[in-house]
Amino acid sequence: MDSGATFRSLPRLSPLPKREAASQLALQNRNEKLIEAMRDYLRCHYREPVGLHDLAASMHRNVCYLSTLFHQTEGVTIHHYLEELRLASAREMLRDPRCRVGEVAQAAGYSSPDAFRHAFKAREGISPAAWRARQP
C-alpha cells in the first residue's frame, strides 16, 4: 500500500475547526468584558487604597490570571494603570491654586504626600509644586 496515496486521499483540515473558532471568539469577548470591568473598577476606586487582591476579589478571579490578562491586553501593568489614573486626577486638582499638595495627594489616592511627590516627579520630571507654577 502506498502511504503517499493514503495521505492524498484525506480531506484537508481547516486550520481551526468552526467549534474551536467559536469558543475562541467567546473567550475573547469574555476577556474584553473582564478587562472593561477591571478598568471600571479601577476608575471608581483609584482614590482608595486598592490593590491587586482587591481587584481580583471583586472580579472573582485569580490574581495572576488578571494581572497577566491586563498586561497582555493593555500593554501596562495594573499598578501602572492605577498610577496613571491617580496622576491624571492629581494634575487636574493641582490646577486649582487653593488645593494644597498634601490635599491633592490624599484626594488622588496616595498613602502620603511623600509617595505622591515621588510618583509625580518620577512621571513628570518635576515636583507637583513646580508643575503647578508652570501652569497658565
Image (tube, rainbow, N blue to C red):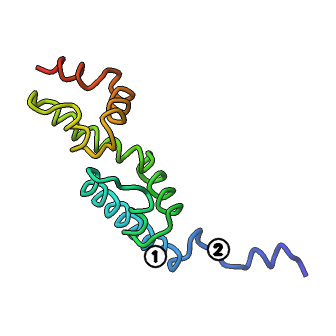
At horizontal 37% and vertical 46% (from top left) the residue drawn is: 81
Report which quarter residue 123 is drawn in.
Answer: top left
Q: Which residue matches tag 2?
A: 12
At horizontal 10% and vertical 20% (from top left) the residue drawn is: 136
Extreme residue in the right direction: 1
Q: What secondary structure is marked by label 2?
A: loop
Q: Position of residue 97 (x, y in %)?
A: 10, 27
Q: Which residue matches tag 1?
A: 22
Q: Amino acid at mark 1?
A: Ala
Q: Position of residue 38 (x, y in %)?
A: 35, 60
Q: Is residue 15 above or below residue 121?
A: below
Instruction: Point out the tag, 1 or 2, that comes first from the N-terminus.
Output: 2
Q: What secondary structure is marked by label 1?
A: helix
Q: Of the residues tagged 1 and 2, which is closer to the observer? A: 1
The residue lying toward the viewer, choosing from 111 and 41, is: 111
How many numbered callouts?
A: 2
Report which quarter residue 9 is drawn in.
Answer: bottom right
Image quarter where the N terminus lies is bottom right
* Numbered tag placed on residue 119 in the rendering: none
Q: Is residue 8 above or below residue 104?
A: below
Q: Amino acid at mark 2?
A: Arg
